[in-house]
Image (cartoon, rainbow, N blue to C red):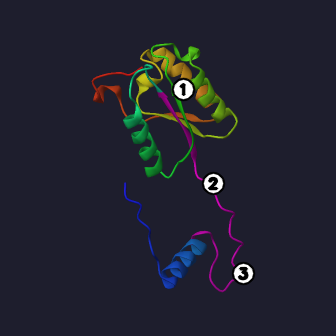
Amino acid sequence: MANTEYRRSEGDRERRRALADHAAGHVPGEGPVPARVAKIDRFRVVIYLCAAANSDITGVRKECTEYAEAFGWEITDVIEDRVGLLPPKGREGLTRAVELVERKQAGAVLTPWRSMISTIPQEYDEVARGVEKAGGFLHVMESDRARPGRPC
């Protein structure tokens, strides 16, 4: 992904600022412009990957990172479980990912495929509810039907 830097003239910045002020209810000439709102932090996610101990997941890790960056999300951590087909409750990394959401260090758990959480719908749903109960959401990049093998 190319990192494109936009350059705006001072006139363009002033025009955009005036549009934003107007959208916020400030009419030019009617008193001072309200103080600027403090900087808003970027949305934070934790990337969760699960695979067998000997599998190579560097490609999928890169895809998740690029996906998060495309949305402007800040990645707080990348957690990898190398335990294979353990149920979700038996994975330390998944537990840590949900804890990051509970502690408000991330707003979502990002994973490439549902199968990295569980191939069993009830287990997947239980994890998704747990993340929601912690105050976030579970975000899956794409369906498992789009790929032939399942690493976890």
Which quarter of the rendering shows the C terminus?
top left
Height in image: 99 above or below 37? Answer: above
Q: Where is residue 78 in the image (x, y as percent from the top left)?
A: 54, 36
Residue in the image at 62% along x and 69% along y:
24
Q: Position of residue 19 (x, y in %)?
A: 54, 75
Find numbered disc 1 in the image and state the secondary structure of the residue it sits on: helix
Height in image: 50 above or below 3? Answer: above
The amino acid type of the residue labelled 3 equals Pro
Q: Is residue 107 left or right of residue 143?
A: right
Find numbered disc 3 in the image and state the secondary structure of the residue it sits on: loop
For label 1, the residue is 128
Q: Would residue 148 be visible to someone looking at this image?
A: yes
Disc ID at residue 32: 3
Residue 24 magenta-highlighted: yes
Could you tell me how far apart the alpha carbons at marks 1 and 3 are, in whole angstroms? 47 Å
Disc ID at residue 41: 2
Q: Is residue 140 left or right of residue 96?
A: left
In front: label 1 or label 3: 1
Q: Viewer-proximal residue, 65 or 108?
A: 65
Q: Would residue 141 be visible to someone looking at this image?
A: no
First to last magenta residue range: 23-49
In front: label 2 or label 3: 2
Q: Where is residue 14 in the image (x, y as percent from the top left)?
A: 55, 81
Label 2 with label 1: CB-CB less than 8 Å: no
Q: Viewer-proximal residue, 17 or 44?
A: 44
Residue in the image at 58% along x and 15% along y:
89
Residue 68 magenta-highlighted: no
